[in-house]
Image: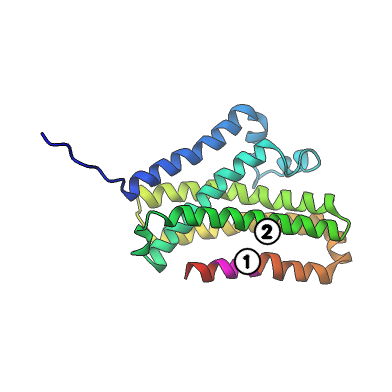
Amino acid sequence: MEPIARTLGQTDWITITLMVSLIFPLIAKSIYYTRFFNFMILPFNNKYITMYTKKEKLFNWFHFLMSVFQIINTTLFIFFIWRSYFNPTEAKNPYIFPLLLAGVFLFITAKTMSQLFNGFIFNSYNTFNELIFKKLTYLNYAGIVLFIANVFLAYVFIDSKILTVIALILFFVINIIGWITVLRNYQKFISSYFFYFILYLCALEIAPLLIMGSFLK
């Protein structure tokens, strides 16, 4: 018998990526069980936001672990979108996912740092810290939806455009809930800096999404 060289197919590395991403919430659950439970019921109960907004805020291990989980699954979901809608041939390039992962990580990091910098400018660092924490918390929760969608897109409904659209809708619904929560809790702060808030929306919320959409095309 002659040895047969086995190449690492797309399903193989996608499986590895999904398993690696799952390690992070499992670690978070094992170390912060109560916090993890409150996080899981976030869209139906505001207890998590109420309990943890004033405590550790952005810089804590639970938030870090869930953010890594979210970034990996957001990147994989973007990969599926790109493969289904834009460029299926280029998607076979083994360097595409690492490049997308680096891009998503830099995108979220740069956006978060820019928002915190705005907090320094307006002498409202704590307020911006709380605001960003709430938004990223909902974004991290949406990562669970993307993880489930990624599993189905990889093994069941492979590259299904309908499933992609459903997952995107759920993703945006969860984040819209987060935005509504933020706007409701910071009405006075936003009204005091309404003009700057509009600039913030255009420069740090809408423009980055347009840039990412152009990149995918």
On the image, numbered disc 2 is attached to which residue?
A: 111
Of residues 36 and 206, the one nearer the viewer is 206
Q: Is residue 55 above or below residue 125?
A: above
Residue in view at x 77 percent, y 38 percent: 56
Callout 2 crowding tier (Cα within 10 Å): few <14, some 14–19, many ≥20: some
Q: Quadrant of residue 208?
A: bottom right
- Looking at numbered disc 1 in the image, what kind of residue is underneath it? Pro
At horizontal 59% and vertical 70% (from top left) the residue drawn is: 210
Instruction: Look at the numbered disc 2 and give the secondary structure of its residue.
Output: helix
Picture layout, residue 211 above or below residue 126 = below
Q: Nearer the viewer, residue 165 or 194?
A: 194
Q: Is residue 77 left or right of residue 28?
A: left
Determine the main secondary structure of the stretch shown in magenta: helix
The quarter of the rendered structure image containing the N terminus is top left
| Image x and y of residue 63, in percent | 66, 41
**Span shown in magenta:** 207-212
Q: Quick one: label 2 or label 1, which is nearer the N terminus?
A: 2
Q: CA distance from mark 2 to mark 1?
A: 8 Å
Q: Residues within 10 Å of mark 1 (few under 14, many from 20)?
A: some
Q: In the image, is residue 105 part of the stretch drawn in magenta?
A: no
